[in-house]
Image (cartoon, rainbow, N blue to C red):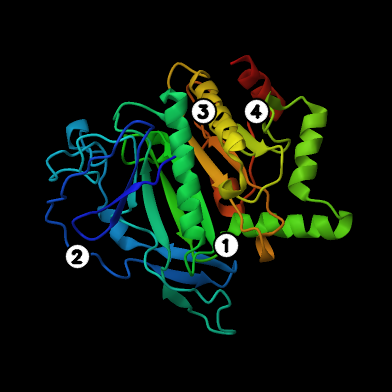
């Protein structure tokens, strides 16, 4: 992958354009009359009852909500007056979110003062949008292989960049697809968050991994992957470098995990051959998802990445795919047990889901 072309949007935000081999990015001047950015658009508040940070980002209420296709802000904008990507065309584009949950450079003191009931802090961090292609009606599953690889290469580029920034503790690449998931823009895209703290789920998994290492001297994630491969009943696909399986204790109606066969902490540690295989299997998984029912499957794709040292050293890079669709016509709602108690109730067996995905 060549170095992305860097551009500046009208309000000073960064835009990066990643081009396929043989193509050249050609942005135009962004002429939109955008307001100056708020240097602190959000706030962190510490929940004493759970020990977790909550992001308060009220300005996100004003973000663009399901515009007509002709007004999509993620489609190319050759006039420089209509789009977040001022260009006649593009392959993959990444830009700072105009309505960020986190923004600004600074380090968070992750140990709040003892005894203080109300602890707040600036919402430091970074939120980026990644547009998978210029095609408004496409999807990741429909990308040609080389284009899917370019998206993955862009993820790796942004992961390396954000991990190197002071104050960024965790880098999270993800995609929400479908109105049922809560997507507000139909154009195929994902997001990249640079959190100033470890997210609760990451912290919980690392605690389990650390305790497992202390008791057994091995890596929890590697042992679980080996056990799933040995059992075989929930394996969906295996390649030289990656394994896709439905986990034994799946929480979602459709859930699939994708692990590299060699333990790495994040995308930057994958070899070029592993990265190409990753893009291929990731692409294949989403294709299977879209063949489950008559309509494309709404899903969330979450890339779990870790730093290679310190408290995150026990991590193991992997992707978790999830869908709330429990049948062709029914959705799984996260009601009281899931939302209030974090106690998930599964409506289908992981083995049945794995068998179905293998068929597809």
Q: Position of residue 163 (x, y in %)?
A: 51, 60
Q: Residue 36 got which mark?
A: 2
Q: Please tell me whether mark 3 or mark 4 is closer to you in this view.
A: 3
Residue 321 sits in which quadrant?
top right
Q: Identify the residue at image location x=40%, y=70%.
A: 105
Q: Identify the residue at image location x=53%, y=32%.
A: 279
- 10 Å crowding of disc 2: few (<14), some (14-19), many (20+): few
Residue receiving disc 3: 283
Q: Where is residue 59 in the image (x, y as percent from the top left)?
A: 29, 60
Local secondary structure at mark 1: loop
Whether the residues at callouts 2 and 1 have beta carbons within 8 Å, the answer is no
- 10 Å crowding of disc 3: few (<14), some (14-19), many (20+): some
- 10 Å crowding of disc 4: few (<14), some (14-19), many (20+): some
Q: Residue 348 got which mark?
A: 4
Instruction: Tell me if 203 is positioned left or right of 190 in this view.
Output: right
Q: Identify the residue at image location x=65%, y=19%.
A: 358
- Which is more N-terminal, label 4 or label 1? 1
Q: Does 136 sit above or below residue 216?
A: above
Q: Identify the residue at image location x=35%, y=26%.
A: 138
CA–CA distance in space, label 3 to label 2: 38 Å
- Which is more N-terminal, label 4 or label 2? 2
- Which is more N-terminal, label 1 or label 2? 2
Q: Please tell me whether mark 3 or mark 1 is closer to you in this view.
A: 3
- Which is more N-terminal, label 4 or label 3? 3
Residue receiving disc 1: 198
């Amino acid at each position: 992958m060549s170095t992305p072309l860097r551009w500046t949007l009208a309000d000073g935000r960064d835009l990066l354009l990643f081009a396929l081999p043989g193509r050249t990015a050609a942005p135009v001047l962004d002429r939109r009359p955008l307001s100056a950015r708020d240097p602190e658009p959000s706030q962190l508040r510490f929940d004493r009852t759970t020990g977790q940070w909550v992001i308060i980002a009220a300005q996100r209420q004003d973000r663009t909500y399901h515009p007509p296709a002709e007004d999509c802000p993620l489609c190319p904008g050759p006039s420089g007056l209509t789009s977040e990507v001022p260009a006649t065309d593009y392959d993959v584009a990444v830009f700072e979110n105009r309505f960020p949950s986190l923004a600004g450079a600074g380090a968070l003191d992750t140990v709040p003062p003892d005894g203080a009931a109300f602890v707040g802090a600036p919402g430091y961090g970074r939120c980026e949008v990644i547009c998978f292609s210029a095609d408004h009606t496409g999807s990741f599953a429909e990308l040609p292989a080389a284009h899917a690889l370019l998206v993955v290469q862009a993820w790796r580029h942004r992961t390396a960049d954000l991990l190197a920034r002071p104050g960024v503790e965790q880098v999270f690449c993800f995609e929400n697809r479908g109105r049922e998931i809560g997507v507000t823009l139909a154009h195929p895209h994902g997001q990249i968050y640079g959190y100033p703290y470890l997210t609760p789920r990451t912290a919980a998994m690392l605690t389990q991994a650390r305790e497992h290492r202390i008791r057994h001297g091995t890596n929890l994630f590697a042992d679980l992957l080996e056990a799933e491969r040995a059992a075989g009943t929930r394996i969906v696909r295996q390649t030289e470098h990656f394994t896709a399986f439905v986990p034994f204790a799946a929480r979602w109606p459709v859930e699939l995990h994708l692990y590299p066969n060699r333990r790495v902490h994040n995308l930057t540690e994958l070899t070029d051959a592993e990265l190409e295989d990753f893009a291929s299997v990731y692409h294949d998984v989403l294709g299977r998802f879209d063949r489950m029912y008559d309509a494309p499957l709404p899903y969330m794709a979450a890339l779990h990445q870790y730093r290679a040292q310190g408290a995150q050293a026990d991590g193991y890079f992997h992707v978790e795919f999830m869908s709330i669709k429990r049948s062709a016509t029914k959705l799984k709602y996260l009601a009281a047990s899931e939302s209030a108690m974090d106690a998930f109730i599964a409506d289908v067996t992981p083995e049945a889901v794995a068998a179905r995905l293998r068929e597809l």
